Image (tube, helix red, strand yellow):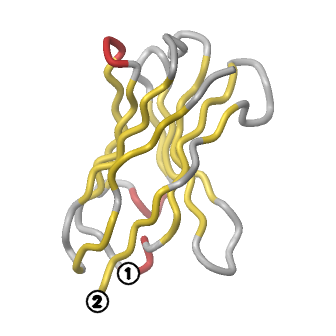
Amino acid sequence: QVQLVQSGGGLVQFGGSLRLSCAASGSIFSTYVMGWYRQAPGKQRELVAIITGGGRTNYVDSVKGRFTISSDNAKNTVYLQMNSLKPEDTAVYYCSAQKIGTATVSFWGKGTQVSVSS
């Protein structure tokens, strides 16, 4: 069983920055694709960014150029640096781990609130 422990988040003004962290309970980055999802009130959970063990990344269009996903293999930690935040980025953000070759997320973090005021 893999545990994903999230930290970071909070309240920030329009245009501000926040960094989210997700620490995995083991060295899983070589066999799992790590990601960040978010869910705003009344909306479906959406994929924000992913990173593979080889460092390849992908982002939803709405955050490209503003968010950066990265990983520190030595610390088993994935980060989401969020810059130029907008009120529409307000959501609960979830860390995810999806085993390579599978179609669904294997493990979820507990979620952390990010709120952006206008």
Quick check: 29 above or below 102? above
Q: Secondary structure at mark 1?
A: helix
Residue 9 at what x, y percent from top left?
Answer: 35, 59
Q: Which mark is residue 118?
A: 2
Q: Residue furthest bottom?
A: 118
Give me the residue at 44% from left, 14% from top.
54
5 and 71: which is toward the camera? 5
Give me the residue at 44% from left, 43% from top.
6
112 and 58: which is toward the camera? 112
Task: Judge left or right: residue 112 versus residue 79.
Answer: right
Classed neighbour count for the residue bearing mark 1: other residues with Cα under 10 Å, few (<14), some (14–19), many (≥20) = some
Q: Residue furthest right?
A: 103
Are the residues tagged 2 and 1 within 8 Å (C-beta)? Answer: yes
Of pointers 2 and 1, the one earlier in the residue sequence: 1
Residue 108 at what x, y percent from top left?
Answer: 64, 40
Task: Judge left or right: residue 17 versus residue 2.
Answer: left
Classed neighbour count for the residue bearing mark 2: other residues with Cα under 10 Å, few (<14), some (14–19), many (≥20) = few
Q: How many marks?
A: 2
Task: Judge left or right: residue 3 versus residue 74.
Answer: right
Q: Secondary structure at mark 2?
A: loop
Q: What amino acid is labelled 1 in the image?
A: Pro
Give me the residue at 48% from left, 37% from top.
5
Residue 29 at what x, y percent from top left?
Answer: 50, 16
Q: Which mark is residue 47?
A: none
Q: Which residue is mark 1?
A: 87
* Image quadrant assignment for residue 65: bottom left
How far is the residue under mark 2 from the one under mark 1? 6 Å
Give me the residue at 73% from left, 30% from top.
106
* Image quadrant assignment for residue 56: top left
Residue 84 at what x, y percent from top left?
Answer: 23, 67
Quick check: 118 above or below 10? below
* Quadrant the C terminus occupies: bottom left
